[in-house]
Image (cartoon, grey):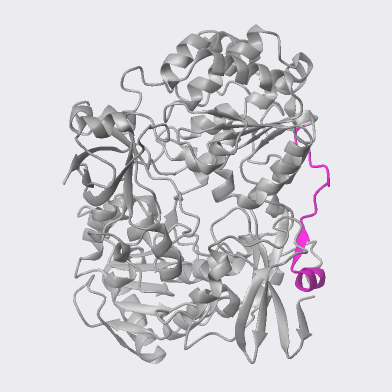
Amino acid sequence: MSSSTHEGSHIVLGTCHHDCPDSCGWEVTVEGGVAVKMRGNAQHPYSQGELCPKVNRFLDRVYSPDRILYPLIRTGAKGTGEFRQASWDEALHLVASRVREVSVEFGGEAIMPWGSAGTQGLIQMNSLDRRFFAKVGASRQVDSLCGATAMVGSTLTLGSPLANDPMDIEFAQLILLWGTNTRLANRHLWPFIEKARANGAKVVVIDPLRTMTAEAADVFIQPLPGTDVALMLAVMHILIRDELTDADYIAQYTEGFDELKEQVSQWTPARAAEVCGISVDEIETLAHDYGTIKPAFIRSLIGAEHREHGIMFFRTLTCLPMLTGAWRHQGGGFSRSVGSYAATNVDDSVFDVPSISAGKERRSLSMNLLGRVLNDTTLAPPVKMLFVYNGNPLVTAPNAELIRRGLEREDLFTVVSEQFMTDTAKYADVIFPACTQIEQIDVVPSWGHLYLGWNHQAIQPLGESVANTELWRRLSAACGFAEPELFEDDESLIISALHDVDIEQLKTDGFVRLSLPVDLLPYANGGFETASGKAMLINHGLPAVGLPALPTYLAGAEMAADPTGQAQYPLSLMSPKTHVRFLNSTYSNLPHHATPEGEMFCELDLVDATQRGIADGDRVRVFNQRGELDVVARVAANGGRVRPGLVVVPFGWVGDRTKDSKTVNALTNDLLATYGGGVSYYDTQVQVEKL
């Protein structure tokens, strides 16, 4: 039921909108117009009634005394967070006036949108904003912080990003969790893994960090960071050497096998063991398990794409099921994202209306290079007006101190739509108050399962906050625009984008499965979306990308550009998500979430810490050419969680919760990935010293 009444209260169904593969169903209990309880929807086939520790306290977020509930206009210096409350009319008039002024003096392309995945809802993430900025003639935002590089990597093998249903992992007998911390970042998949385990499945975790998922595995393999491709090539070497391949599948459905065989013949287990920092026995056992235990399911997420050559992780990984024919079996194959399947029922191209832009070409600006764009004195026209929504780039985007310098520009007019006074919002000229998910309607397509979720509005928006779609409607009106497409209502937007969906069932149940086969086996009989219809074991469209040789395996892109840098910054930095109570920068500002997680830290191996005279609990300086952090050191007495040469500063804190108001992205590399427009967070070198 979309809404049911019980003892004076009623229950409203919704769907979590966060940047997470799980897209859980929830129930909100409302009494007298106030949300008093939230719990998981027990009927949801994937999340099955459980919410994560973040969303369990979602109502704390909704009713936080720190919510921004009214428009704000800056009164102090940029970055001080000094604002005064304003009326909607005043704030809209100010922003619309600036849009006109910038457009007249510099042209529409001097206006830049920066929107991320603060909501992954169909219409609240991207719909009317696309129409508004097309009408303005603004620069077009391109690239993505996460996802695109991994998608391109898979496509370079498969011809499309389509892969297996993650829920089919319960039918596997061998599960490889490669570069994914499932129990933390994909927790609702874990019960399906446990079902497989109860039926005898073996779980192998491959990760440079000993995560909570690694602790729960049957086997943990810990290669050096950035060396996964060498391990994959050695596994291929063994599969071919020991005749553990599916010759029939290879012959029918792949191309390039002979050339692949020649190339991987050079990647002996001994060579890969040296590069990866693991034993030959570990590689031999992994390959033999993968070649003999069926069905075998490979699960990964997006962390491994965050390198200059991140596509090669996914390009190579998706070749493995080709060699063994794992695609033939339910519970076999590979899955990273199933978001592309949503196109079977969701067409968001309806949000683009060509007539609004009158056919004008618009330049593209990368969201990943925001710091460079804002500080580029040669850019013509320069960015003079910035809109930020669904994101907090000063915390989540790379090279954050360069972004900060750009936001400090007095000639840059910044508009932010937000729920809280984030690091980025402090630099705004105008802030508009944004709704939370239970104050708006939306549909949420998932990239972690095959269900669409409906989100009913449970309560009226608090204060004067509005949904994103309403913000764009109001801005269009304030700018004097008249096209009716700029003012389309929310339900009409949703209905126009959905096709072949029983919308009444979706509203009533809160979810509906995409129109796909129950036993989804996309490549059981080939069907690859390539020119030949076969999977590309060799792709000649790619340039040769060699693996760095020892001992500079950790050097990455930065060292290629600066060969002297390794001596100055000898440690490789990773910035993973490690906190059960944070989601990117969301929730880390709230006391009940932030306080139990403690202080931002730097995790070192015992060897590296001892060399620097650092003990567990010491304050340390982590630094490179981009910035520095003042954090506390964590050093395990016996080592093992991180490898020598690697340090970890987790992602998620906001500036108000750190010693020096900076976060890990003050250090990270903003080099774009070779393919896909992703960003090389993990190609970052640092030094650590005791304070």
Residue 148 part of the magenta-drawn span: no
Q: Give percent across and percent down for residue 218.
A: 62, 31
Q: 80 or 310, which is in the foreground?
A: 80
Question: Which residue is drawn at the image coordinates 29% and 72% (left, top)?
Answer: 426
**Where is the N terminus found, in terms of image quarters?**
bottom right
**Res. 392 image quadrant:** bottom left
- Residue 205: in sight, yes or no? yes
Question: Which residue is drawn at the image coordinates 49% and 74% (left, top)?
Answer: 61
Q: Is residue 94 above or below residue 52?
A: below
Q: Is residue 412 above or below residue 313?
A: below
Question: Which residue is drawn at the image coordinates 59% and 39% (left, top)?
Answer: 216
Residue 510 part of the magenta-drawn span: yes
For residue 639, side relative to residue 247 (left or right): left
Q: Give percent across and percent down for residue 225.
A: 42, 30
For residue 353, side relative to residue 636 (left or right): right
- Residue at far left of view: 691
- Residue 441: in sight, yes or no? no
**Res. 377 image quadrant:** bottom left
Q: Is residue 34 above or below residue 343?
A: below
Q: 73 or 287, which is in the foreground?
A: 287
Q: Give percent across and percent down for residue 288.
A: 66, 16
Q: Give percent across and percent down for residue 57.
A: 54, 70
Q: Is residue 522 above or below residue 103?
A: above
Question: Which residue is drawn at the image coordinates 27% and 67% (left, top)?
Answer: 384
- Residue stretch in magenta: 504-523
